[in-house]
Amino acid sequence: MSSTIDDHPAGPASGPVVASTRDELRAARESLTSRDVAVVMTMGALHDGHAQLVRRARAEHDHVIVTIFLNPLQFGPKEDLSRYPRTFDADMAICTDAGVDIVFAPTPDVIYPDGDPGVRVSAGPLGTVLEGQSRPGHFDGMLTVVGKLLHLSAARTAYFGQKDAQQLLLIRRMVRDLDFLVDVVAVPTVREEDGLAMSSRNTYLTESDREVALCLSRALQAGADAAAYGPSAIRRAAREVLVEEPLALVDYLVLVHPTTLSDVPEWYRGEALLAVAARVGTTRLIDNTPVLVGPGGGRLDVFSPETTAASAPIR
Ligand code: AMP
């Protein structure tokens, strides 16, 4: 059941407690007055997309933990770990405004005290397609740290963005397949006024890159506008927008089933994921929208509970 922000305390007036070790996190958790704790996991460089996750968590639970951890395990050797923006003071200001109780900001040696962990979570076949095809090992690294942070935060509910649709699906699968005792909540993608999905990586874009990057959200909208006419109309409409922008180097544009990530056949009617990845300048961008395919169809914010039930925890 959702509740309004008035039902819950506003968070500590003095700002969040910052914990950077397991002991500090445990002490901070023990000082909370209720066990109704939600977690929002981030890699820092917070923007309004992250803030929206926190606001939802804040409105629906007594306490909110935000984790800020740039997880080396989910970056490939040629990826942007070293240049990823680090903006801790600004992140703290956002967490303070949003009424966060605890910020857990560990260093890699706290999370991985023995160095590279021998045991990892395997994302399985769903981790090898789309983003997983371009970023081998990414989802194993992501799930491994999400699993650890779920244990360490001991939160009952975790909020994730629809922006990272495949990540969200894999986290739901992990929670179900490995019996994690946590509810996963999806938050719709937060966009700039011109449609660009907010991302910490948008800071890499030059002014002209940023113009080029708009073709991703425009392609998704064109696809969603054709939803009533079926899968090939959706794919065609989205592709037509992308081919108009040769400076966006498209990695993939797909219309797939929300839980299997397989291409939907032409006869398919129901919810599907329209997803795109492209390189613009030096930056790899991803975006997606859930769509309802078929008569009366169109764009959705997030998938329905009926669709996500297939990857919900078994209680
Ligand atoms: P990141 O810091 O990029 O790992 O993102 C942390 C969380 O914020 C993930 O659950 C993301 O899906 C979510 N997130 C990032 N960007 C957005 C956005 N534009 N709208 C909604 N959620 C987002």
Image: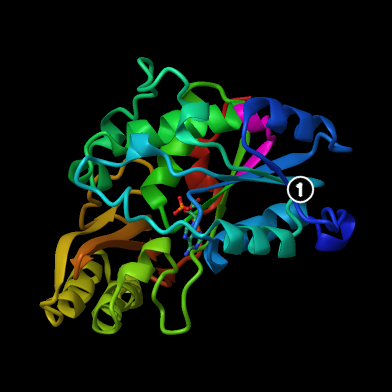
Residue 54 at x, y percent in the picture = 65, 56
Residue 277 at x, y percent in the picture = 24, 60
Tell me if residue 155 is in the magenta stretch.
yes
Give me the residue at 43% from left, 72% from top: 296
Q: How crowded is mark 1: few (under 14 residues within 10 Å), some or many (20 or more)?
A: many
Residue 308 at x, y percent in the picture = 50, 44
Quadrant (top left, top right, bottom left, bottom right) of the C terminus: top right
Could you say which is closer to the camera, residue 238 or residue 175? 175
Residue 212 at x, y percent in the picture = 23, 80
Q: Which amino acid does label 1 sit on?
A: Asp
User: Is 242 on the left or on the right of 140, as rendered?
Assistant: left
Give me the residue at 81% from left, 61% from top: 4
Could you say which is closer to the camera, residue 239 or residue 100? 100
User: Is 310 on the left or on the right of 24, as rendered?
Assistant: left
The answer to which image quadrant residue 149 occupies is top right
- Reading the image, the residue beneath label 1 is 101
The kind of secondary structure element at disc 1 is loop
Give me the residue at 52% from left, 28% from top: 110
Residue range of the region highlighted in magenta in the rendering: 152-158
Give me the residue at 24% from left, 84% from top: 208
Tell me if residue 229 is in the magenta stretch.
no
Could you say which is closer to the camera, residue 314 or residue 250? 250
